[in-house]
């Protein structure tokens, strides 16, 4: 399937000696060496990426890394020195002006860090600016602007002036202005960078909620890795005009491509990056009414787990049994095969697949495996407590991660012989 936005071999060199600068780049010279030799500045070097429809693609890097130059090439504000920028297959880097205008008017909107609101226009008039440029009649402009303001929680402030709004509200107006034209692609250049941390987090959360409803294709520029990890379906990290790594938040935190990326992610709160799904095992279970206690103990031995979930015929969780309890029941009753229902625990931890590890710490501390269930309470995975602790510590379940109580440990503890 064709990507909504595709960037192929894009370079941007600022200065007069672009051909010489490109030649030096091909020879492996650095951005600094090229500037000293030619006076030309390398803005972007050999950018290649695709953005699928409905995806949030975050471009992240420090000041001077080239991210703002890149996003301005995505709507033709800055022409690339070479390469292609394709929107639905049309190359805006090499097209006539009327084609570029059409694509901008019909498909792309941009939200900047600085709100750039007209101070003497009302909030609704500011939100309708893009529609006015497109020649939409006044009554329709207002209707669509107010609808966009409603989406960002400002419908009641339509007739206020920007000076009457807080900074966070003004940025919401900027976002509404972008949404009012109903663009297919939304380019956001550090849109929350000027906001206080608390308001910034509120805006990030609001964008996540909006995206679930609107499903826009978004390219989001930021210098804040926490913001990138929160928002991005995929993240590109830039350094000196080039991409050093592209991947999901989990891929970048788990396997940084080089020391530059590793330094970025070193202090990241892993509990807010990884989810229950990222550390869950297969939904191994025994079925109530079909499996015996002996079957459950044998399954735990094969899986090397100390507990196992019990499900009904529709794969809904009924309870959990532990090896220790089954072994103890066998010894106490003198019977080799106690009834599962008599030993099964009916209070157990359960979470959705998208719950962050940060919210699993308490449940993991209780010691029982955590059931991952879908919206019909069916078992879709199992999270072992040690997998949560290993991921939070950065061990990823390897090397020094604390192992679960093994079946052999339980046998020794109870003196059971099975």
Image: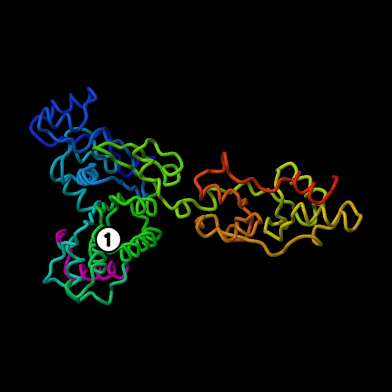
Q: Nearer the viewer, residue 30 or 290?
A: 30
Q: Nearer the viewer, residue 331 or 229?
A: 331
Q: SS of the residue at dot 1?
A: helix
Looking at the image, residue 159 lies above or below residue 291: below
Quarter the C terminus occupies: top right
Q: The magenta stretch spans which residues?
A: 133-151
Across and down, in percent, residue 188 comes to 26, 53
Q: Is residue 117 visible?
A: yes
| 218 lies left or right of 138 | right
Quarter the N terminus occupies: top left
Q: Residue furthest right?
A: 334
| 331 lies left or right of 372 | right
| 212 lies left or right of 68 | right
Which residue appears at 80% of the width and 48% of the height? 295
Q: Circle 1 sits on which residue? A: 179
Q: Residues within 10 Å of mark 1 (few under 14, many from 20)?
A: many
- Residue 35, quarter of picture: top left
- Residue 408, quarter of picture: top right
């Amino acid at each position: 399937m064709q990507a909504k936005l595709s960037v192929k071999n894009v370079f941007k060199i600022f200065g007069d000696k672009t051909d010489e600068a490109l030649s030096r780049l091909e020879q492996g010279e650095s951005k600094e060496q090229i500037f000293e030799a030619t006076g030309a500045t390398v803005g972007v070097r050999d950018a290649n990426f695709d953005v699928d429809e409905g995806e949030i693609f975050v471009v992240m890097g420090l000041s001077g890394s080239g991210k703002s130059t890149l996003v301005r090439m995505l709507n033709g504000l800055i022409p690339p020195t070479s390469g292609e920028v394709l929107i639905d297959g049309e190359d805006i880097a090499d097209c006539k002006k009327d084609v570029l205008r059409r694509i901008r008017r019909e498909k792309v909107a941009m939200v900047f860090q600085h709100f750039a609101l007209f101070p003497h226009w009302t909030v609704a008039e500011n939100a309708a600016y893009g529609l006015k440029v497109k020649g939409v009649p006044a009554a329709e402009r207002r209707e669509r602007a107010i609808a966009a303001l409603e989406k960002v929680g400002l419908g009641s402030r339509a007739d206020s002036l920007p000076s009457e709004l807080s900074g966070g509200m003004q940025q919401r107006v900027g976002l509404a202005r972008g949404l009012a034209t109903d663009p297919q692609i939304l380019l956001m250049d550090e849109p929350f960078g000027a906001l206080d941390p608390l308001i910034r987090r509120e805006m990030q959360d609001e964008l996540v909620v909006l995206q679930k409803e609107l499903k826009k294709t978004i390219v989001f520029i930021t210098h804040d890795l926490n913001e990138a990890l929160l928002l991005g379906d995929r993240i590109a990290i830039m350094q000196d005009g080039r991409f050093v790594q592209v991947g999901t938040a989990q891929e970048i935190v788990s396997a940084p491509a080089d020391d530059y990326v590793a330094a970025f992610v070193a202090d990241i709160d892993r509990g807010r990056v990884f989810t229950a799904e990222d550390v869950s095992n297969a939904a191994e279970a025994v079925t109530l009414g079909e499996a015996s206690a002996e079957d459950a103990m044998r399954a735990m031995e094969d899986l090397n787990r100390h507990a196992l979930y019990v499900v009904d015929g529709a794969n809904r969780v009924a309870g959990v049994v532990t090896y220790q309890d089954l072994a103890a029941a066998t010894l106490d009753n003198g019977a080799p095969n106690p009834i599962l229902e008599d030993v099964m625990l009916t209070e157990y931890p359960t979470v959705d697949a998208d719950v962050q590890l940060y919210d699993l710490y308490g449940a993991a501390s209780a010691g029982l495996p955590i059931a991952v269930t879908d919206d019909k309470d069916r078992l879709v995975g199992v999270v072992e407590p040690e997998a949560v602790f290993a991921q939070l510590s950065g061990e990823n379940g390897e090397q020094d991660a604390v192992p679960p109580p093994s079946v052999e440990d339980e046998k020794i503890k109870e003196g059971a012989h099975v």
